[in-house]
Image: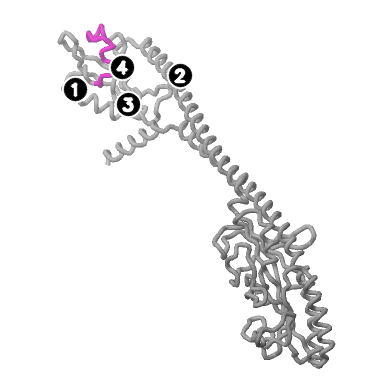
Amino acid sequence: MSGAGGFAAGLRSWSRRLLGRDLLAAVLVLALVCAAVYGAYRVVAARTEDEAVAGAVNVAERDARILVEYWSNVQDRVTRLQIMANSVTLAQVNGDHTGMQRALDTLKAALSVSLRGFVVAAAVDPRGFVMWSTQPAMDLPIDVSDREHIQAILKQGQETFVGQPVVGRVSGQRTIQFAAAQRSDDGALIGVDVVSFDLTRALELEKRLTHRSRDLITLVRGDGMLLASSVSQGVGMKLPSLTAPIPRDDGGTVLFARRASRIDGVRRIFVRMPVPDSDLSVAVGLDEETALASAMHFQRRLRIGAYLFCLMAALLVGAAVIVFRLARNADAKASREALLHQIADRSHDIIGVLDHDFRYLFVNDSVQALLGVAASELIGQPAGGLVLPEYRKAVIAKLRSLSGTDDSYRVTAPFAHRDGGEIWLEYDICHIRLPGSDPAGQDG
């Protein structure tokens, strides 16, 4: 047990000498400084990123509003054309061929002067066959009974519907069909009027709005189906909804998200806005890497600056600890020297001061006259070297027993003189503590 206790005490003493309270305090201060710097970096970096994201959202929202206005105009024209198409259908059903032809000519003229992109208007009967068309029929009536938007109206009773993108047989381009059910006065379904719109025209506007090669502009149906995309990918797939509304000063909101696009996997900042009075919405996605490039560059510089600041702080704290310890050791050494000389001046017999390893730290010059040994020869030597061998073990044991206590012990032991004689001396052994010494150690 005594061996284990001595090892533990030695370990504690070694750790205290290695670290010291001043070094521990310096480490704590440095840790607090670095934590504060890191916290400040995180706050500034987050604010910078939020500002960059807000700027990208404003750009995307501006483009989205332009597209919403464009598709609102398309929707208005669709409504007008469908009203004209309804007149053609009613005239055909009523057998008014003259009125039907007149209404059909009016509809054709309206298509020609309408927004670029409207290519054909037609009507489909409840069986799914074309009743009439603004384009001359092919060799046979066109069977469209398998098209989703027609089936939705015929089978589910929907009054209006936006079809999925298909390649138009007239234009040869990808088109979407705006369809509306036409009913008689008693509510019976007469047919479905269809207006086809060429998406190539719309994509011309969308491509002019994209600021960078990886920006994305899409037209989305109410159920999430992608109708058109500026990157020509993913048409017909279902897109997830954006669920983060951002309130605006005008009382409205826009939907916002930061995520990887399901179309091509590129991370983008998305803004989605609905087209009023329609089943459409537009989504603008700005490439996140490009949109936030300046903010990310600033964050990297800020992070490097924080690392350098912490490194400089560590160097300064280390230098301060070294200077403090040197100054403290110098003061302690001066105090020790003064105390040792004070002890020597007040002593008339052999006076030796031992360190915690029981080696001579100071020896009174009177040892030269008493034992014929110069004091300088004993400095750093283990205690007991001048005591005769048969008494040496008892003296060392007593020194160990007094270590760390304030007790004193009077002992008489023979000392060996340099010329070979013996001198019996009576002396006191006591523990003293020098200024700046380790509290756990034996100083003298």
**Badge 3 density bin: few <14, some 14–19, many ≥20, Cα 10 Å:** some
Q: Can you say which quadrant of the picture contains the C terminus? A: top left
- Judging from the image, what secondary structure is the residue with disc 3 in? loop
How packed mark 2 is, by other alpha carbons closer than 10 Å (few <14, some 14-19, many 20 or more), is: some
Label 3 sits on residue: 356
**Residue closer to the observer: 197 or 377:** 197
Query: Mark 1 or mark 3: which comes first in sequence?
Result: 3
Taking the magenta stretch, the answer to whether it contains residue 376 is yes
Q: Position of residue 425 (x, y in %)?
A: 24, 14
Query: Given the image, on which type of amino acid does mark 1 rest?
Result: Tyr
Task: Read off the residue under disc 4.
Answer: 352
For the residues labelled 2 and 3, the Cα–Cα distance comes to 20 Å
Q: Amino acid at mark 4?
A: Gly
Distance between mark 1 and mark 3 Cα atoms: 21 Å
Q: Nearer the viewer, mark 1 or mark 3?
A: 3
Residue denoted by label 2: 331
Query: How far is disc 1 from disc 4 in space, using C-alphas?
Result: 18 Å
Image coordinates for residue 114, horizontal then vertical, percent: 79, 70
Badge 4: few (under 14), some or many (20 or more) residues near its Cα, within 10 Å? many
First of labels 2, 3 by sequence position: 2
Front one among 364 and 307? 307
Judged from the image, the secondary structure of the residue bearing numbered disc 2 is helix
Report the magenta residues as a range: 367-383
Residue 152, image quadrant: bottom right
Q: Look at the image and tell me whether residue 119 can be seen.
A: yes
Is residue 289 shown left or right of residue 198?
left
